[in-house]
Image (cartoon, rainbow, N blue to C red):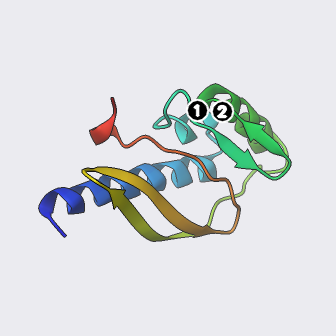
Amino acid sequence: MSEIRTADEAAIRAVLDDSYRAWAAGDAAAMVAAYAEDASAIMPGSFRGSREVIRESMAGAFAGPLKDTSIRSRELSVRFRGPTPLSSSARRGSSSPVRPRCPRHAR
């Protein structure tokens, strides 16, 4: 793996780690801080079509059923398509797929 790819993968993992720490702290704003404005999340029974909608729903969840919870996660892989990161896949205790924006490749 090239030095650039290694750095890209580390940046992606850092974004995910920050999101997990924010979840454990119950901080919805910090959890979505690195998400693109047009990020989307598909969670059981609902589609959340923007960073703000995701933040609002997570703030409500952190105040209620997800209060004092955390995510157990182990990233399985970071995949690249061409010169930019494509996605990461993770195995989590709670499934909430999102598109975090890697600061290095923000446009």
Q: Amino acid at mark 1?
A: Ala
Image depth: mark 2 or mark 1 in front: 2
The amino acid on which the numbered mark 2 sits, given as a three-letter code, is: Arg
Which quarter of the picture shows residue 79?
bottom left
Q: Which mark is residue 29?
A: 1
Disc 1 packing (10 Å; few <14; some 14–19; many ≥20): some
Mark 2 in CB contact with mark 1 (< 8 angstroms): yes
Does residue 9 lie above or below 60 as drawn? below
Q: Give the camera-side residue of 21 and 78.
A: 78
Callout count: 2
Residue 90: which disc? none
**Mark 2 secondary-structure assignment:** helix
The quarter of the displayed image where residue 92 is located = bottom right
Query: Disc 2 to disc 1, how far (Cα)?
Result: 6 Å
**Residue 43 locus on image (x, y percent):** 75, 50
Q: Residue visible at 56% across and 41% down?
A: 31
Residue under label 2, please give it.
55
Decide: is 55 above or below 75: above
> Does 42 sit left or right of 77 as displayed?
right
Q: Position of residue 71 (x, y in %)?
A: 63, 62
Q: Residue furthest left?
A: 3
